[in-house]
Amino acid sequence: MRREVVWFCAILWSAPLLAEDTELNLYRPLTEGTKNLPLTVSAKKMGECRIQSQLIKREDAWRCVAEGKIYDPCFVQRFGSHLEAVCPESPWSTQGIQITVATPLDNSKHEALDMSRGYPWAIELSNGEKCQAIETKETYDGLPVRYSCNHESTLIGHVQRCENTWKMLHHASNGVETVQIKKAWF
């Protein structure tokens, strides 16, 4: 019996050692040589970008409208004319659209990126499931729904950053559980 208890404790204590740190990625669709997939512009549209992105708080991220459709986030190149914003479908997608605006976009009044407190634009869980930030007023059990995942589930509440591996509450048809975040894109 003692041997089983020792084995159980050894497994229990070693489990956290197997967890990897959450990988933080700064998404840069307009920069070559980064970890991002190359982005192909599938369409070019005229539009407007009036406010900062509501899905990711960073200086170069905008919420744009073109042909009656909202695109969020859209990214403006740091240098150049500031007349074009690129709106990718997701950080793991190779497709996006380019929106051209009439007057240069000014990033100076935007809230700065703070990875220690802000919410990522997208998340990959340790099981490979991918989730993207959504704009909703929905709640589950009093907690805000923040992400929609590709297996018809959601991430709710707040990102738990107390350890090197970030965690969040995952709500699926079988209930709520705490899951580990493998990667986060800002």
Image (spheres, grey):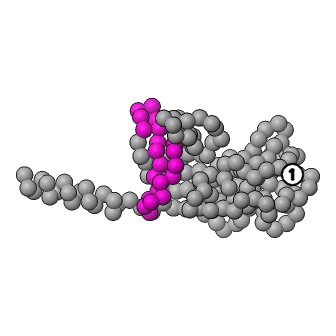
- In the image, taking residue 167 as reference, residue 137 lies left or right, namely right
What residue appears at the point 52 percent right and 56 percent down from the top-left corner? 183
Indicate the position of residue 91 as horizontal and vertical percent values: 63, 53
What residue appears at the point 30 percent right and 57 percent down from the top-left corner? 15
Up-down relation of residue 146 to residue 113 (above or below): above
Furthest residue in direction front, as rendered: 142
Q: Answer yes or no: is residue 85 visible.
A: yes
**Pointer 1 residue:** 100
Indicate the position of residue 117 as horizontal and vertical percent values: 58, 59
Q: Quadrant of residue 104?
A: bottom right
Circle 1 Cα neighbour tier, 10 Å, few/some/many (<14 / 14–19 / ≥20): many
State the extent of the magenta-drawn residues as a range: 155-176
Furthest residue in direction top, as rendered: 173
**Kind of residue indicated by mark 1:** Thr
Q: In which quarter of the image is residue 60?
A: bottom right
Magenta residue check for 164: yes
Magenta residue check for 69: no
What residue appears at the point 33 percent right and 59 percent down from the top-left corner? 16
Up-down relation of residue 6 to residue 55 (above or below): below
- In the image, taking residue 175 as reference, residue 158 lies left or right, namely right
